Amino acid sequence: MAYPIKTDIIPLLRHLAEALMPVAQANFVGLAFETEAEAVELSFLPEDVVKSVGQILCRVIAYTPSGYEARLSVELPEEEEQVLISIANTGVSLPVLKEITAGLPLPVEAKGRSGEGTRFELRLPLVPEGEAVAESARHAPQEKGEDNVPILFQKLRSRMRAYATGMKSLEEAVARQHGQREQVFLKKVNAIILANLSREDFDVRALAQSLALSRTQLYRRLKPLIRQPPSRYIRFVRLQKAKAYLEKGEMTVSDVCFQVGFTDKSHFTRVFKQQFGFSPSYLRKNTTIHHG
């Protein structure tokens, strides 16, 4: 059973915005974090806050057109014993409000802005007076809560990035930023990797040969599109496919491991957990229970 903690929520939200910056960059959407308070002490469940704010922010980024902006803000409304956390975008109102807010542990209010954007609001009560610094929290030192969040974000950073930025979203982002020619190139890269997924020896050299490019040529052309080295991208695709297999619930972890080109199950489990934040056996177990 999870228990709430009493601490400064500002570092948590700031780290969340920083963790999702690569996701925004991959979708060519600006991302900003704004707060009028240097520190706000609350009693809250970190998992609920991260899941609610993180999911909304990821999906707002995904639905916001290239060239516009998403913004995570923290406000302390006058004469209200609560903190207002808002996620908003510019450029277009989002019509898929139910998809964005589905399954959240915290209540969220969505507000459209006549074609200019959409704003999602979460309100959390401040710690009662006498237990914390309500008004003076606006001027409290920022470092107060920093030590409480890095461990949490070491676990969550890669998970949110991996969930929000799959191959399809990268292809669409590349089309918007670099044009159809480069999108076609990335689609070809993805198709070749997927066709050789079960081959443990399929590496950057093999990918370059399949594209009739040198390794240097491949690196120079591909890295600006995927914002990571080609070798890491090959592993990224393997693990994305592994997650898709496990979510179907039809294969064991060992079968999936070999199907996506890993011969060492321990190594597969370790890198899978690094990318998604949980083990493949955890996903397999929970998928089986859900389907059952």
Image (cartoon, helix red, strand yellow):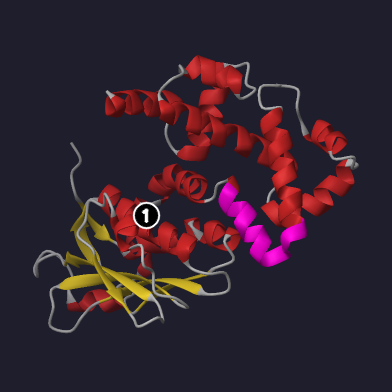
> In the drawing, does residue 181 fall left or right of residue 156?
right
Residue 128, image quadrant = bottom left
Q: Quadrant of residue 182?
A: bottom right
User: Where 68 falls versus 237 (above or below)?
Assistant: below
Prevailing secondary structure of the magenta residues: helix
Left or right position of 209 against 61:
right
Q: Position of residue 38 (x, y in %)?
A: 34, 74
Residue 62 belongs to magenta span: no
Q: Is residue 176 left or right of residue 52?
A: right
The count of marks equals 1
- Left or right: residue 167 versus residue 221 is left
Residue at disc 1, secondary structure: helix
Between residue 128 and residue 270, name the one nearer to us: 270
Q: Quadrant of residue 181?
A: bottom right
Residue in view at x 19 percent, y 78 percent: 135
Q: Quadrant of the N terminus?
A: top left
- Looking at the image, can residue 229 be seen? no
Residue drawn at 72 percent across, 64 percent down: 178
Classify the position of the C terminus by image quarter.
top left
- Residue at horizontal 83 percent and vertical 46 percent from the top: 218
Residue density around tag 1, few if under 14, some if 14–19, many if 20 or more, within 10 Å: many
Residue 265 on image: x %, y %? 55, 17
Q: Position of residue 67 (x, y in %)?
A: 58, 74
The residue closer to the viewer here, 214 or 39, is 214
**Residue under circle 1?**
55
Examine the rendered structure and indicate whether residue 278 appears above or below residue 91: above
Residue type marked 1: Gln
Q: Which residues are magenta?
A: 168-181
Above or below, comparing residue 138 to residue 282 in the picture? below
Q: Is residue 109 visible?
A: yes
